[in-house]
Amino acid sequence: MDICLHFDQEAGLFDLLLSGPPADLQGDEGLLTAVIISLFTDARAHDDDPLPDERVGVPGDRRGWWGDCLPDAQGERTLESIGSRLWLLWREKDLDSVVARARQYAEEALAWLTREGHVSSLSVSVERVQSGHLGIGVVLQPSGSDVPGREWRFIYDHQQARPVSVRLAA
C-alpha cells in the first residue's frame, strides 16, 4: 500500500491525505500514487536530450532524483530512474512531435509497473486537448486482480511543466 496523494486543483499541487481518528496518513491500494510519482517526478535527462533552458541561453541541469545516483545492492549504478522526462517539453510548441514524445516519456516512466509485476497490462494515450495542454490517459490492470482495470486522465500543461487536472475516468 502506498501513501495516498491528492491533487488540489486550486493550488495545482499534490498533498498527503489524513484519515482517522486516530490521525494517520491515508493509504492508496490502487496504484494511483505510483502512477503520479512516475509521471510527475522529474527523471534525469538523457545525455543527448536538449534541455529547455539551454534553448534560451541559460545553462540548465539534467534534473532527476538524487537516489538514482546511488549504487544498487551489487554496487552497480542502475540505468533506470524514477520519474518521467515530461519536464523536457517545457517551452515546446504545440506540435505533433510533442504529443509523440509525451507518450514515449509516459510509457518509459510507467514501464516499471509491468516489469516488476504490479500490473498485467498497461496502456498510455496522449492527445492535445487545448493549446499547451496534453491529455494523458493511463489504463492499467493490477496483476492478479479480477476487478476491471482502472483508467486515469491527467491534463498536463507542458508549457508550464505541471499537471492541472487529475481524475479517475468513468
Image (cartoon, rainbow, N blue to C red):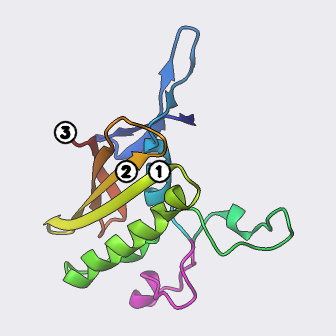
Q: CA distance from mark 3 to mark 1?
A: 20 Å
> Mark 2 falls on what kind of element?
strand
Picture layout, residue 80 above or below residue 113: below
- Residue situated in front as seen by the camera: 60 or 136: 136
Q: For the residue carrying disc 2, how many other residues have a C-alpha within 10 Å: few (<14), some (14-19), or many (20+)? A: many
User: What kind of residue is marked 3?
Assistant: Ala
Res 84 visible: no
User: What kind of residue is marked 2?
Assistant: Leu
Picture layout, residue 138 above or below residue 142: below
Q: Earlier in the sequence, mark 1 or mark 2?
A: 1
Dominant secondary structure, magenta: loop
User: What kind of residue is marked 1?
Assistant: Val
The outermost residue toward the top is 21
106 lies left or right of 46: left
**Residue 135 placed where, x, y %?**
23, 60
Residues at circles 3 and 1 in contact by the CB criterion of under 8 Å? no
**Residue 10 placed where, x, y %?**
28, 40
Residues at circles 2 and 3 in contact by the CB criterion of under 8 Å? no
The outermost residue toward the left is 130
- For label 2, the residue is 140
Q: CA distance from mark 2 to mark 3?
A: 14 Å
Q: CA distance from mark 1 to mark 2?
A: 6 Å
